[in-house]
Amino acid sequence: MNNKMQEILEKQQEQKNPDTETDDVVQLVGFIVGNEEFAVPILSIQEIIKPIEYSRVPSTPNYVLGAFNMRGNVIPLINLRLKFGLPGRKDDEETRYIVIRDREEVCGFVIDRLTEAVRIKESDIDPTPETFNEDVNLIYGIGKKSDRLLTILRPAELLKRTF
Amino acid sequence: MDEMQEIMEDFLIEAFEMIEQLDQDLVELESRPDDLDLLNRIFRVAHTIKGSSSFLNFDILTRLTHHMEDVLNKARHGELALDSKIMDTVLESIDMMKGLLSHIRDSGSDVDSGIEIEVVIPKLDAISKGEDPVKAVAPAAEETPKKAPKESEKETPKESESQDDDVDYSNMSPDEIENEIERLLSQRQEEDKKKREEKIAAGESVPQPPKVDIQEEETKPEAKAPTPKPTPAPEPPKPKPAPAAAKKPEPAKKAEPAAAAKAPTTAIEQTIRVDVKRLDHLMNLIGELVLGKNRLLKIYDDVEERYEGEKFLEELNQVVSAVSIVTTDLQIAVMKTRMLPVGKVFNKFPRMVRDLSRELKKNIELIITGEETELDKSIVEEIGDPLVHIIRNSCDHGVETPEVRSEAGKPEGGVIELKAYNEGNHIVIEIKDDGKGMDPDVLKEKCIEKGVISEREADSMSDKEAFTLIFRPGFSTAAQVTNVSGRGVGMDVVKTNIEKLNGIIDIDSEYGVGTTMKLKIPLTLAIIQALLVGVQEEYYAIPLASVLETVRVGHDEIYTVEGKSVLRLRDEVLSLVRLADIFKVDTVFESAEEAYVVVIGLAENKLGVIVDFLIGQEEIVIKSLGNYLKGIEGIAGATIRGDGKVTLIVDVAAMMQLAKEVKVNVSQSMAEDKVKKDKNSPSDYVVLAVDDSNTDRAIMKKSLKPLGITIVEATNGLEALDIIKSGDYSLDGVLIDIEMPKMDGYTLAGEIRKYNKFKNLPLIAVTSRTSKSDRMRGVEVGMTEYITKPYSPEYLMNVVKRNINLKMEVTS
């Protein structure tokens, strides 16, 4: 009985292993902020919407634009350009709000434009270069996709209040 | 195990509920010792708790309640007259019972609670035997520590009996001992039997028509309880009787909780216990619905405008109104499920006042009215502490001792009234005493003495403002710190707690006659009425509970006193602050000629908030801003309005705090900025001298020369205004003559003050007009200082130096 179980389990394992080799892929959504392309795991994204009206919240850093209403929920809005220390710019046709969720926390982020959903093999993601030590927690790694480089962000860190 | 846990939780909930009622009943009992109804009720509580606790194996609690039950039972049957000495002991034991229950709640057991029931049990025994409890303590206390804590409750009386018999066991042979035990046991059984018969006889003879069945149910198991005892009796060895007696009643007692549990449920209406979380969730859903309703109403308004006269509008109107009414009703209904009578809190006060009046040797009566008034559960929980402090305060500082009272021609007994009633969307709790009242002058003196306020502040204070001094932290008028109060903490707590609830405190007192304190508290917290205001392009919601009134004032009605804006409102002086300054709203457009002032009141404080426009009153649902934006100063939360926009809700208490800082911060940071910003030498300071007379300007320049600052000149108001507006100079101050052609000094000052960025620019009037009305006018238009001609050069120099914050040494 026990041996049988063992056998079955082992078989399953064998079947799984080759699959996971090829399936060890992360799905990401890429977007542009400033001159760089960033990405976040697709599962952390609740939705992507066109810019809507928001209300300013006082006593917050400049990158916290305020809060907006998404179907009856009040959601903070953060401008990633300002958060990354880039000069702000006006919203245009391509500006989007990416609404990211991590467990109970939800925040909207203003980005310049979306690129595409990408699949990247885990092995193609390099750990953060050590010289980046400041935002080390925010960045999960650097993904390589053909000739492009994607900075993959950690949603949990993005949603962390740092003021 | 889980089942046990559940039973225990139920037991605790029930026990605490009963105890709440108990305190009040006991105090009432003292004044009406013959009230059988009351006695029965109290007895039942002790009895029920005893029953349940023995079932749950809380031995200590069982032992204590058993002894209480003995005393109460005697009293119930008229064998014992309750006097205050007995009551003290009973109350003491009830306190212990509470302590034990809390301990059980916290740790799940009644062992090691640090509560010494052995102190009170001999007293209770003595009472039930008809002795003086105080005398009994000494010998009995010696006896008790020897006993194991788990000993049967029956053991104690037995032991004392055998002491009475004075039998010397040490000299007996084993046989003799056995005989002796048997003798004692049978003697005991005889007594028990007699007692039982008495009990049953008494229990049935009690004339109590409506509750007869309950009564019977209770007496029956009790009567049964001791009956199994005869069986184990013949078994000889010494330690046996104790555990046997303790164990045997158990099966019978198991039946008791059931019987006891039935008793209360049959007495009150049908209820079901619901987890508060479920109600909260329901409340949230209703909140969503209210938002939807608001939105619908707004859309209907738009539609109505566009399709005026169309037939379908009528139908739409009906649907919208129906939905709106049902939503409102639903909201009220759910709110009601969360409501509790405020009596839940009031219940503990009669006991407190009784204890305090005994302790303070005063004669105080507490009259409670309106205890059935209902409040949201969360609020009921919050107001307990503040009320305790206020009532303690009334007892200690308010009501005088009987001697003082009769000297003053008052009745010896003082009265504290505790009243609750509804007023609109608020509940008002009024605490009124007929004590000595407060003397505003004494209050001020004390505060100055303790450095809480300055003498100048005291001078400008009205009596009513002086009364509010008692809420300042560190304030205490008590000459001595007593057990009851005087540490200067209590009233501060009252203020903080009431502020948390967005409540308002109103205090009134007449020296020698009494003090009245009114707490005005909103009924609920989740959905509130709010006043929506606009500041530039932003909107804010101010909880209506904190809004006292709104007034429209012209800019000329706003005065500046020591750099702070104030408004004279009827006979009060109100400090003003711009909402835009509190929340650092960017100025997009010039504010209008007239401003709206929202007068907000919180606890005992008032503040005028200047806003650009008022939108109106709306029902809003408080939503959290999430972790990311939580806890931002001055913001209590957000709401979504009918148009779908997010509107922030002002945290009134925090805003009051922020308002205090605004002035200081603005002037300070400006001063700091100036010093930092390329102001390295005095010549970097620029002062504009506005005067139509060349001579006068020359005198000004000459007087200020030692300072080494740069002076720009203008010959009339218009010219000066152009210079200021052009921004060519960053001005640090303006010297203004009043009488000038084209535009006079008053108008100039008024014009300058219209600009936000020149709000703090020092304006110094230099004039030969010396009358008081001229000075007043100067203050009204926003002059910072008023200098009359002729002046000494040093004087002008010092005034300018002070106003422009010149920190450097004068060179010449």
Image (spheres, rainbow, N blue to C red):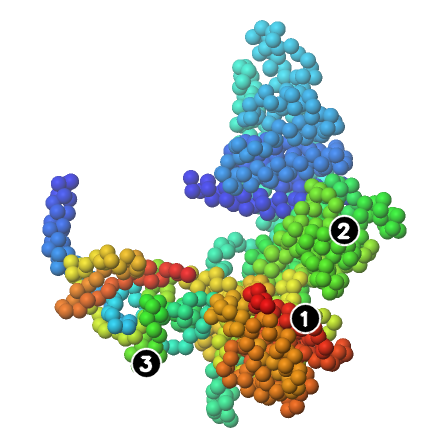
Residue B13 visible in this rendered orientation of the protein = yes
Can marks 1 and 3 be said to lie on one chain?
no
The relative height of residue A49 versus residue B347 in the rendered view (above or below) is: below
The disc placed on residue B741 is: none
Work out whether residue A93 or residue B95 is closer to the camera in this orientation and state it. A93
> Measured from the top left, where is residue B35 in percent x and y?
75, 43
The quarter of the displayed image where residue B454 is located: bottom right
Can marks 2 and 1 be said to lie on one chain?
yes
Q: What residue sits right under mark 3 in the picture?
A: A92
Kind of residue sitting beneath label 3 = Asp
Pointer 3 chain: A
Q: What residue sits right under mark 1 in the picture?
A: B795
Callout 2 secondary element: helix
| Rendered residue at 28%/71% (across/down) | A33
Decide: marks 1, 3 in contact (CB < 8 A)?
A: no
> Measured from the top left, where is residue B416 in percent x and y?
75, 52
| Rendered residue at 66%/90% (across/down) | B741
Residue B612 visible in this rendered orientation of the protein = no
Judge from the rendering whether residue B538 lies leftward or rightward of residue B68; answer left or right: left
Q: What residue sits right under mark 2 in the picture?
A: B398
